[in-house]
């Protein structure tokens, strides 16, 4: 995989983690439990996407080294 793609995926990971943090902050300020729970679930999904992007970037790094 080209280096620019690995950088892009790494950047996506950071961007997705920031989205998750934003959702967590919204959850902290939610006025009811259902809304808080929805924001926390959304944050978990963003974190999962970030982890997947990071894993793809790591996998690409290993592939490039061979």
Image (spheres, grey):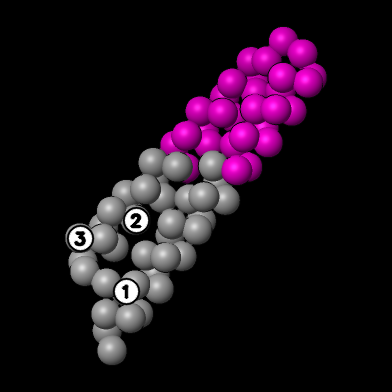
Circle 1/circle 3 CB separation < 8 Å:
no
Residue 61 badge: 1
Identify the secondary structure beneath mark 2.
helix
What whole-number distance in Å separates the C-alpha atoms at marks 1 and 3?
11 Å
Residue 4 badge: 3
Tell me which residue sits at (46%, 65%) in the image: 55
Q: For the N terminus, which image quadrant? A: bottom left
Residue 44's place in the image compared with 52, above or below, is above
Which mark sits nearer the N-terminus, 1 or 2? 2
Residue segment shown in magenta: 17-45
Q: Residues within 10 Å of mark 3 (few under 14, many from 20)?
A: few
| Whole-percent x, y for residue 35 in the image | 72, 19
Identify the secondary structure beneath mark 1.
helix
Residue 14's place in the image compared with 24, above or below, is below
Tell me which residue sits at (57%, 51%) in the image: 48
Outermost residue, front side = 1
Outermost residue, bottom side = 66
| Whole-percent x, y for residue 20 in the image | 53, 36
Question: Most prominent secondary structure in the magenta stretch?
Answer: helix
Identify the secondary structure beneath mark 3.
helix
Which mark sits nearer the N-terminus, 1 or 3? 3
| Whole-percent x, y for residue 39 in the image | 65, 27
Mark toward the viewer: 1 or 3:
3
Circle 1/circle 2 CB separation < 8 Å:
no
Residue of label 2: 9
| Whole-percent x, y for residue 18 in the image | 44, 37
Which mark sits nearer the N-terminus, 3 or 2? 3
What whole-number distance in Å separates the C-alpha atoms at marks 1 and 2?
11 Å
């Amino acid at each position: 995989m080209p280096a620019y793609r690995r950088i892009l995926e790494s950047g996506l990971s950071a961007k997705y983690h920031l989205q998750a943090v934003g959702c967590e902050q919204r959850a902290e300020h939610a006025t009811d439990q259902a809304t808080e729970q929805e924001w926390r679930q959304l944050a978990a999904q963003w974190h999962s996407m970030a982890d997947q992007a990071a894993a793809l970037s790591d996998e690409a790094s290993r592939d490039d080294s061979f």
